Image: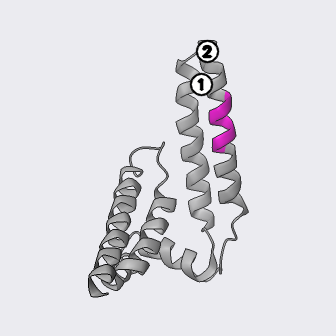
Amino acid sequence: MIVKASARNFLWTGLGFISLALGVLGIPLPVLPTTPFVILAAYFFSKGSPRFHHWICHHKYFGPMVLRWEKHGSISPRAKVLATALILVAMSGPFYFFSDKILDVVKIITLILVGVGWLFIMTRPNGPQDDR
């Protein structure tokens, strides 16, 4: 029984670090979204390692977004504006540089997927106004 629990904790914690790594990669790369991966990492850490869950919840940069999500299921207005700006920047490159007809289908699919992601972000509550 103890071995199974340890293996399960190891798996959850490993998934947490993979998600966190993807979130950190998303900071300079607008294609990867940082916030969802960091929130996912916090979820995995909560299942596998209370120590790492506590760490990510109290991290200088990641902590506020994780706690806001865990307490209120919300995304701050500042994060929404930043996400919108980064989405526009990320989407402008492919549309500006690529004009091949074959890529038109890729552009449409990309627009649909990005639109769904953007709508999800925009429809989340802002959370309490006194939280900053």
Looking at this view, name the residue that lies furthest to the front.
1
Residue closest to the eye, 88 or 106: 106
Task: Please tell me in which quadrant of the rendered image residue 102 appears.
Answer: top right
Magenta stretch, main secondary structure class: helix
Badge 2 is on which residue? 102
Instruction: State which tag comes first along the sequence, 2 or 1.
Output: 1
The N terminus sits in image quarter:
bottom left
Q: Is residue 110 magenta?
A: yes
SS at circle 1: helix
48 to the left or right of 91: left
Residue displayed at 35% across by 85% down: 50
Would you place residue 79 above or below residue 114 in this image? below
Q: Which one is in front, 114 or 77?
A: 114
The Cα atoms of the two marked residues, 2 and 1, are separated by 13 Å
Q: How many marks?
A: 2
Badge 2 density bin: few <14, some 14–19, many ≥20, Cα 10 Å = few
| 1 to 47, vertically: above or below | below
Tell me the element at label 2. helix
The C terminus: image quadrant: bottom right
Does 122 lie within the magenta span?
no
Q: Residue at x 55, y 79 (%)?
A: 70
Q: Which residues are magenta?
A: 108-114
Q: Residue at x 37, y 67 (%)?
A: 16
Q: Name the amino acid type tagged 2.
A: Ile
Residue 103, by quadrant, is top right
The answer to whether the residue labelled 2 contacts the one labelled 1, judged by CB atoms less than 8 Å apart, is: no
Which residue is labeled 1 in the image? 95
Q: Position of residue 80 (x, y in %)?
A: 61, 59
Q: Amino acid at mark 1?
A: Phe
Nearer the camera: disc 2 or disc 1? 2
| Relative image position of residue 110 (x, y in whole percent) | 62, 35
